[in-house]
């Protein structure tokens, strides 16, 4: 199977992109990680080579991470918030010459790393569109958020059908080429949502100025709500793994996801532990993959942060016992 992996980033999330690439290497992935970016490229990416690149991007900067893994940076011109650009970006990749021979396409947020062999993920997409349950799941059939979706999209001629109580996270999706239809449903849901919230340039951030978040706030998670709407709008098989997939609860972790505003490269672990907030599995997984083959942080940070994290984890256990 020929797989393509993609992500979207801007600002200091480049540290997460590097850790994601490192985790793909350690998981045994071979191929391209396509990183759509806005703003300036990080300095470490300048080691890549500028090359013509098929699709709407024209050119890319290609960094050879290893002989079997390339990190391909493509500049974005969209005015949409990047979290709302996911389905459109994935469709662009599938429909470009770069994705012409792709059997499966995966999107991962740049605050995720893999901790399972890549072969598992390629097996997973044979079961249906691969998705992960969110921390805010489940949402039963008549939960106000689901009722809000049904009422809104029905007014735009789109009937939704309840298919299960799982509410999935927008940070990961994997699908086979023949499931391209799912991305069309997701993108359509996003475009229709824009009429309600005001613009796809908005997302759940501190400065978001939504015109409306819909009935009972049913659109305050934009890309994630659109993704869940897509599940109910189509009849394609979906394969949802529970909250343990993203290390949101104990279990066999697959791709720990560092949810929240403070990312692993930003967190003050000791201070948070003293406040009763211990390190998360996603924090530990990030630092396990921060050391290479791509290195974006100084050596002293890569030494002190894991040490701080270990001490914070010990403090966290003590505080829980008290």
Image (spheres, rainbow, N blue to C red):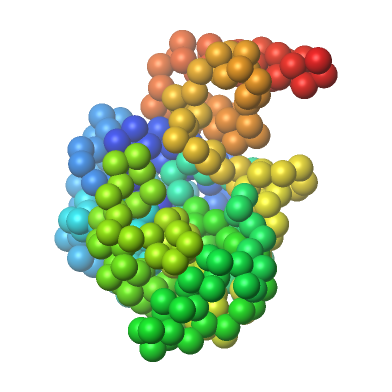
* Image quarter (top left, top right, bottom left or bottom right) of the N terminus: bottom right
**Residue in view at x 60 percent, y 62 percent:** 167
* Image quarter (top left, top right, bottom left or bottom right) of the C terminus: top right
Q: Nearer the viewer, residue 213 or 189?
A: 213
| Quarter holding residue 237 | bottom right
Q: Nearer the viewer, residue 154 or 98?
A: 154
Is residue 100 visible in this depiction of the protein? no
Above or below residue 259? Residue 76 is below
Q: Is residue 108 left or right of residue 120?
A: left
**Residue in view at x 44 percent, y 44 percent:** 110
Is residue 316 visible in this depiction of the protein? yes
- Residue 47 location (% of width, % of height): 27, 34
Above or below residue 284? Residue 153 is below
Above or below residue 163? Residue 52 is above
Q: How many marks?
A: 0
- Residue 111 location (% of width, % of height): 48, 41
- Residue 144 location (% of width, % of height): 56, 66
**Residue in view at x 62 percent, y 72 percent:** 142
| The furthest residue to the right | 321
- Residue 229 location (% of width, % of height): 49, 72
Above or below residue 210? Residue 248 is above
């Amino acid at each position: 199977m020929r797989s393509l992996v993609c992500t979207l980033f801007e600002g200091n999330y480049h540290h997460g992109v590097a850790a994601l690439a490192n985790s793909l290497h350690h998981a045994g992935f071979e191929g391209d990680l396509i990183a759509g970016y806005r703003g300036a490229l990080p300095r470490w990416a300048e080691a890549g080579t500028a090359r013509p690149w098929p699709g709407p991007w024209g050119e890319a900067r290609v960094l050879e991470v290893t002989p079997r893994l390339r990190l391909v940076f493509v500049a974005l011109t969209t005015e949409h918030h990047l979290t709302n650009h996911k389905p459109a970006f994935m469709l662009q990749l599938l429909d470009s010459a770069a994705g012409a021979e792709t059997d499966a396409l995966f999107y991962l947020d740049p605050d995720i790393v893999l901790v399972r062999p890549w072969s598992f993920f390629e097996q997973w997409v044979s079961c249906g569109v691969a998705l992960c349950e969110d921390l805010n799941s489940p949402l039963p059939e008549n939960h106000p958020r689901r009722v809000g979706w049904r009422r809104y999209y029905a007014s735009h001629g789109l009937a939704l059908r309840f298919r299960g109580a799982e509410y999935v996270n927008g940070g990961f999706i994997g699908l086979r080429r023949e499931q391209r239809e799912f991305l069309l449903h997701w993108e359509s849901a996003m475009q229709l949502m824009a009429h309600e919230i005001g613009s796809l340039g908005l997302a759940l951030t501190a400065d978001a100025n939504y015109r409306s978040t819909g009935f009972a706030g049913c659109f305050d998670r934009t890309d994630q709500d659109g993704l869940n709407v897509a599940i109910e709008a189509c009849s394609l098989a979906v394969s949802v793994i529970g909250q343990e997939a993203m290390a949101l609860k104990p279990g066999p972790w697959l791709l720990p996801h560092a949810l929240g505003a403070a990312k692993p490269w930003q967190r003050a672990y000791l201070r948070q532990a003293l406040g009763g907030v211990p390190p998360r599995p996603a924090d530990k997984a990030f630092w396990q993959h921060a050391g290479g083959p791509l290195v974006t942080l100084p050596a002293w940070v890569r030494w002190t942060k894991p040490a701080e994290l270990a001490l914070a984890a010990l403090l966290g256990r003590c505080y829980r016992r008290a």
